[in-house]
Image (cartoon, rainbow, N blue to C red):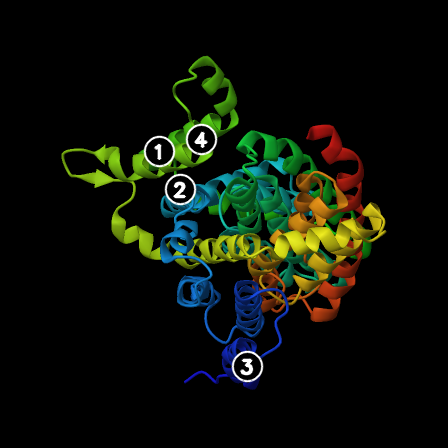
């Protein structure tokens, strides 16, 4: 049986204990309801940080505590768990499920690697581009899991060659491994569905402030940022871990062999590819379609659900009742993440409804802190805290507070919320920071000090890029 660590045992009891102490205390911080929301937030943060129970189970606490302590009626709390953003991500998960089921994601990745070339640095770049592209559409965990065995097959060719595993070989292996993990993190920033914190932000903006960012608008901002970050990661890796003079011709055959094992593109792969292409095109051209057909009222969520239903309902073989996806396939769906979104939105609604966000806004507006300094500190806080706890949980807690700070500073909330949310996906230092970091660390080819050495540089560069985004790019786009 697995050992239940002491930190989890402490967290399990500390969370509810502090909540109870808040409730029975005679000291009132704001108001009865606001104090309940603060106490709930503290309980959730403790359970999220210690992972005493599943982070998804923790996200159900508002559903229990807010109606029980008269913060909000159950119908209002529950609405957050059925928010359109939750269903936008559900549709995205279903698309990802289909890509993985027919192995299309692996074919796309291998094809990208093959096209980029087979010199050592080009192979590193190929792995990074392929991983980043997949992370735009499927979870960064899944994209890393797909890339790892392909990368290991190439690295094993170097381990087993005539000169053994030399320093140059080790540098190449390290660059490939870190390149996969870091580009999986950075790739998700490019799209709304690429990483959960993006969706938490979009949900908060729509639910609380009636601000809509379309799939295309996010990509216009997120894709260049993601591409710039990945290019920087690539150049830092090949400079810090040089493999100059490394020659191997076997990598091309390894990639070709992997592709050959997949065989010709199957009819099912083609059907998923067509569905995927149609859905992405609808996301990109939604505004144009709505302007041409104003009564249609397409939203990103409607398009996402259309794609999901199509994969379950359009038959691949009608006579045999064969469809791309069957309900049994959804056992692999990340249902817990959907609940986590709902919990984050419910928490944000509680903070807003009880006046906590307004109090933060007023406090900031009455201070004389520089806007740029405030933005920089919030970006640094988010980026380095996400090294230690779930980025989606952290975004759920911090995003409504950051919105209050933006209101207090009298700047558009998007200017502050977007870079702070993006910062949650820029954790490169520690294995526990993100699932991709943990997966490549588990390969045994990466040491903690090696990841931290590159990671601290990338974290600081990310802070710089996000400040530039805040100061110059976002005012231009929005």
Distance of mark 2 from mark 3, alpha carbons?
Answer: 37 Å
Q: Mark 4 or mark 1, which has the lower sequence index?
A: 4
Question: How many other residues sit within 10 Å of disc 4, few (<14), some (14-19) or many (≥20)?
Answer: some
Distance of mark 4 from mark 3, alpha carbons?
Answer: 42 Å
Using the image, determine if residue 447 lies above or below residue 211. below
Q: Mark 1 or mark 3, which has the lower sequence index?
A: 3
Q: Residue at x 78, y 56 (%)?
A: 377
Which residue carries the number 4 mark?
Answer: 299
- Of 77 and 288, which appears nearest the observer? 77
Which numbered marker is on residue 391? none
Question: How many other residues sit within 10 Å of disc 2, few (<14), some (14-19) or many (≥20)?
Answer: many
Which residue carries the number 1 mark?
Answer: 306
Q: Does residue 356 appear to the left or right of 257 in the view shown?
A: right
Callout 2–callout 1 Cβ contact below 8 Å: yes
Q: Mark 2 or mark 4, which has the lower sequence index?
A: 2
Where's residue 137, x and y in %? 50, 42
Where's residue 131, x and y in %? 58, 46
Which residue carries the number 2 mark?
Answer: 91
| Nearer mark to the viewer, of 2 and 3 | 3
Q: Mark 4 or mark 3, which has the lower sequence index?
A: 3
Callout 4–callout 1 Cβ contact below 8 Å: no
| Nearer mark to the viewer, of 4 and 1 | 4
Callout 2–callout 3 Cβ contact below 8 Å: no
Callout 1–callout 3 Cβ contact below 8 Å: no
Q: Residue 48 falls in which quadrant of the image?
A: bottom right
Where's residue 143, x and y in %? 52, 50
Q: Does residue 228 appear to the left or right of 51 in the view shown?
A: right
| Nearer mark to the viewer, of 2 and 4 | 4
> For the residue labelled by badge 2, is the local secondary structure a helix, a strand or a loop?
helix
């Amino acid at each position: 049986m697995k050992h239940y660590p002491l930190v989890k045992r402490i967290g399990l009891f500390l969370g509810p204990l502090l909540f109870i102490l808040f409730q029975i205390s005679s000291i009132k911080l704001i108001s009865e309801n606001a104090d309940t929301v603060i106490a709930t937030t503290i309980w959730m943060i403790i359970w999220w940080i210690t992972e005493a129970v599943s982070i998804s189970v923790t996200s159900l606490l508002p559903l229990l505590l807010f109606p029980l302590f008269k913060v909000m009626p159950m119908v209002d709390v529950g609405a957050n768990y059925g928010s359109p953003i939750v269903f936008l991500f559900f549709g995205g998960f279903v698309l990802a499920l289909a890509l993985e089921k027919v192995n299309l994601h692996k074919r796309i990745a291998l094809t990208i690697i093959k096209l980029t070339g087979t010199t050592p640095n080009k192979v590193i770049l190929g792995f990074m581009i392929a991983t980043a592209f997949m992370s735009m559409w499927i979870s960064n965990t899944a994209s890393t899991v797909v890339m790892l065995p392909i990368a290991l097959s190439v690295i094993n060719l170097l381990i087993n060659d005539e000169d053994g595993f030399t320093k140059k070989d080790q540098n190449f292996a390290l660059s490939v491994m870190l390149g996969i993990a870091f580009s999986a993190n950075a790739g998700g920033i490019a799209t709304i569905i690429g990483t959960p914190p993006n969706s938490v932000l979009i949900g908060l903006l729509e639910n609380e402030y009636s601000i809509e960012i379309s799939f295309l608008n996010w990509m216009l901002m997120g894709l260049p940022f993601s591409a710039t970050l990945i290019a920087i990661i690539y150049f830092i890796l090949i400079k810090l871990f040089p493999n100059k003079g490394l020659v191997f011709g076997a990598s091309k055959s390894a990639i070709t062999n992997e592709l050959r094992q997949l065989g010709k593109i199957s009819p099912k792969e083609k059907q998923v590819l067509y569905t995927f292409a149609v859905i992405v095109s609808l996301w990109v051209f939604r505004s144009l379609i709505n302007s041409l057909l104003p009564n249609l009222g397409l939203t990103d969520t409607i398009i996402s659900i259309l794609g999901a239903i199509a994969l379950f309902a359009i038959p691949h073989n009608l006579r045999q009742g064969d469809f791309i996806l069957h309900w049994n396939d959804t056992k692999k769906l990340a249902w817990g993440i959907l609940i986590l979104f709902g919990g984050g939105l419910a928490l944000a609604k509680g903070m807003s409804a009880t006046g906590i966000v307004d109090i933060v806004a007023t406090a900031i507006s009455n201070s004389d802190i520089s806007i740029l300094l405030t933005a920089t500190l919030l970006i640094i806080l988010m980026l380095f805290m996400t090294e230690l706890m779930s980025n989606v949980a952290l975004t759920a807690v911090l995003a409504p507070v950051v919105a209050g700070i933006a209101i207090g500073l009298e700047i558009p909330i998007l200017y502050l919320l977007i870079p702070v949310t993006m910062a949650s996906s820029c954790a490169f230092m520690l294995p526990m920071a993100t699932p991709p970091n943990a997966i490549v660390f588990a390969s045994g080819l990466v040491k903690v000090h090696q990841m931290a050495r590159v990671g601290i540089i990338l974290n600081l560069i990310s802070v710089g890029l996000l400040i530039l985004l805040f100061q110059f790019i976002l005012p231009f786009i929005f």
